[in-house]
Image: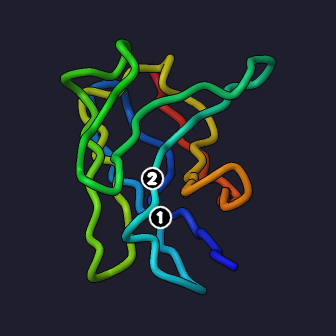
Amino acid sequence: QVQLVESGGGLVQAGGSLRLSCAASGGSVRLYNMSWLRQSPGKEREFVATTSWSGTTTYTDSVKGRFTISRDNAKNTVYLQMNSLKPEDTAVYYCRARASSVDDYWGQGTQVTVSS
């Protein structure tokens, strides 16, 4: 059973940067697709970025050019570097590890708040 723990969230001014980390334990996530999703109050959880097990990355349009997802398989960790943050990026950010429909794990989330 894979456990995911996010860290790195916090309060930052607009234009600032944060780096989120998602540390996995209980098994290697080397062959998992790793994703970041976020949820703002009153809104549905939305996709932010993903890195496949082969290293292919995909981003939602609103973060392209500002966010970078990466993974360190040796550390069993995935990162989300967030630059040029905007108030609309404020949300709880969740890490997800998915290899199949039954091999699908979520972290508890980390709060990111961007002040204007």
> Which residue does the image show at 27% across and 38% down from the upper left?
57
Q: Note whether 66 is above or below 37 in the view shown.
A: above
Extreme residue in the right direction: 42
Residue in front for this viewpoint, 10 or 62: 62
Left or right? Give the position of 52 relative to 68. right
Residue 66, numbered circle: none
Which residue corresponds to mark 1?
Answer: 22
State the image quarter where residue 29 is shown. bottom left
Extreme residue in the bottom direction: 26
Residue 16 % position (x, y): 28, 35
Left or right? Give the position of 72 relative to 87. left
Which residue corresponds to mark 2?
Answer: 34
Residue in front for this viewpoint, 104 or 84: 104
SS at mark 1 in the image = strand
SS at mark 2 in the image = strand
Q: Amino acid at mark 1?
A: Cys
| Quadrant including the N terminus | bottom right
Q: Earlier in the sequence, mark 1 or mark 2?
A: 1
Report crowding for label 1: few under 14, some 14 to 19, many 20 or more residues within 10 A (C-alpha).
Answer: many
